[in-house]
Image: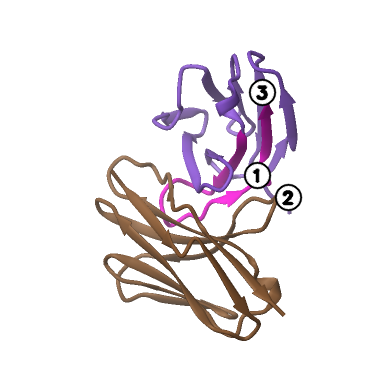
Chain colours: A brown, B purple
Amino acid sequence: EDQVTQSPEALRLQEGESSSLNCSYTVSGLRGLFWYRQDPGKGPEFLFTLYSAGEEKEKERLKATLTKKESFLHITAPKPEDSATYLCAVHAGGTSYGKLTFGQGTILTVHP
Amino acid sequence: GAGVSQSPSNKVTEKGKDVELRCDPISGHTALYWYRQRLGQGLEFLIYFQGNSAPDKSGLPSDRFSAERTGGSVSTLTIQRTQQEDSAVYLCASSLAWGSYNEQFFGPGTRLTVL
């Protein structure tokens, strides 16, 4: 069974204090790993897709990396507007038709 | 350019009643997904549509849950004889086609509360 575990469950940072969120996964044949951002009362917003170990992608203050067992979302010099829940999800091989298996999320709070 | 829309945004119902939740995907998107998100939890896959057919219903929790899609567009998720454990946010997503090369775009969700 595909499993995704995110840590920490919650992270509180001061503005400008860089840190990383972790996503560990166990899947049979990874097709893609996805990062989403979710604001309260809204649906998840797509951030990145990573397909193979060693791949990295960046967007503003966010950088996502992928190994064979985990992914990291690095946040550099965060701002209060980066506060949100960050969700990690995997698309596994087989007959999953693109359905995503999600982790429980990391709640990030950035204080000014 | 409209995104994925869902209605109603909030639904409060009494235990035992039936409810219908609606999803309008992005125009031209052939793949449509329903997920459920319980409070403080990640998203849980329910069902996937390709066009009007549902090749993967593996996430539907019980036979009280059903879904259909018509005209390759609008989808309806129906929950019969609702139970308190059905309380959650129901999210719909669409993508251009199935597979990991096609990112899923999510709607705002329908918050269902069963009293």
Instruction: Give, as a three-letter code, the residue at label 2.
Output: Ala
Quickly name the residue at label 2.
Answer: B2
Helix, strand, or loop for circle 2? loop
For the N terminus of chain B, give its image quadrant: bottom right
For the point 51% across and 33% down, the residue is B51
B94 part of magenta stretch: yes
Residue A43 in the figure: left or right of residue A48: right
Labels 1 and 3 within one chain: yes
Instruction: Give, as a three-letter code, the residue at label 1.
Output: Ser
In the rendered image, residue A77, in percent from the top left (x then y), is placed at 60, 85
Q: Which chain carries label 3?
A: B
Question: In this picture, which residue range is highlighted in magenta?
Answer: B88-114
Cα–Cα gap, marks 1 and 2:
8 Å
Quickly name the residue at label 1.
Answer: B27
Please count the marks in the image: 3
In the rendered image, residue A60, in percent from the top left (x then y), is placed at 60, 80
For marks 1 and 2, give the one nearer the viewer: 2
For the C terminus of chain B, give its image quadrant: top right
Q: In this view, does B103 lie above or below B8?
A: below
